[in-house]
Image: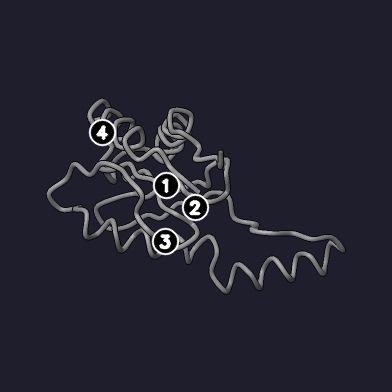
């Protein structure tokens, strides 16, 4: 899976610059939890913290517990249910994290906002960011 890293960086940099409540915007691989590209604009939230968020994000969307939930739902519904999580919100001290799987299902868009941004606006920002990002489809 190839991602257009330069375009992702450009989109994320512009997005963070244009939205004063947005601390960071990034794309994270669901395959290995790696930080693919993005922009961080906060002294208290740097790229090393984003690496930690990247690793945790892959676990949130594809971890053992999600697998167990998928199997349980599949058994109960009588049909295959894979990866039931599509969006995740985390309210942390000093920041809100909004995450959503990209169309290709191999990566996640992450938006980190100031804690005073209303939750609904965070989701609106994330939806807008996703619409501007290349989706990383295989050629």
Disc 3 residue crowd, few under 14, some 14–19, many 20+, Cα 10 Å? many
Q: List the residue tagged with mark 1.
A: 98
Q: Residue at x 69, y 59 (%)?
A: 82
Residue 20 in the image: state x and y as whole percent: 23, 31
Marks 3 and 4 sit apart, C-alpha to C-alpha, by 21 Å
Q: Is residue 69 above or below residue 24?
A: below
Marks 4 and 1 sit apart, C-alpha to C-alpha, by 17 Å
Query: Which residue appears farthest toward the left when viewing the image?
Result: 43
Query: Which residue appears farthest toward the right when viewing the image?
Result: 78
Disc 2 residue crowd, few under 14, some 14–19, many 20+, Cα 10 Å? some
Marks 3 and 2 sit apart, C-alpha to C-alpha, by 15 Å
Q: Secondary structure at mark 1?
A: strand
Among the two numbered marks 3 and 4 on one chain, the one whose residue lies closer to the N terminus: 4
Q: List the residue tagged with mark 3.
A: 33
Res. 34 mark: none
Q: Residue at x 39, y 46 (%)?
A: 27
Disc 3 vs disc 1: which is toward the camera? 3
Marks 2 and 1 sit apart, C-alpha to C-alpha, by 6 Å
Q: Secondary structure at mark 4?
A: helix
Q: List the residue tagged with mark 4.
A: 13
Question: How many numbered marks have been drawn onto this rendered protein structure?
Answer: 4
Among the two numbered marks 2 and 1 on one chain, the one whose residue lies closer to the N terminus: 2
Q: Is residue 49 above or below residue 7?
A: below
Among the two numbered marks 4 and 1 on one chain, the one whose residue lies closer to the N terminus: 4
Among the two numbered marks 3 and 2 on one chain, the one whose residue lies closer to the N terminus: 3
Disc 4 vs disc 1: which is toward the camera? 4
Q: Secondary structure at mark 2?
A: strand
Q: List the residue tagged with mark 2.
A: 88
């Amino acid at each position: 899976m190839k991602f257009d890293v330069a375009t992702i960086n450009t989109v994320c940099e512009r997005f963070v610059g244009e939205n004063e409540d947005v601390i960071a915007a990034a794309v994270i691989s669901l395959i290995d939890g790696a930080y693919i590209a993005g922009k961080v604009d906060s002294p208290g939230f740097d790229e090393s913290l984003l690496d930690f968020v990247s690793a945790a994000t892959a676990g949130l969307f594809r971890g053992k517990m999600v697998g167990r939930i998928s199997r349980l739902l599949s058994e109960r519904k009588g049909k295959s249910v894979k990866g039931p999580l599509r969006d995740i919100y985390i309210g942390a001290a000093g920041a809100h994290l909004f995450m959503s799987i990209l169309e290709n299902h191999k990566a996640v868009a992450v938006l980190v906002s100031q804690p005073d941004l209303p939750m609904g606006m965070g989701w609106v920002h994330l939806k807008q960011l996703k619409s501007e990002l290349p989706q990383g489809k295989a050629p």
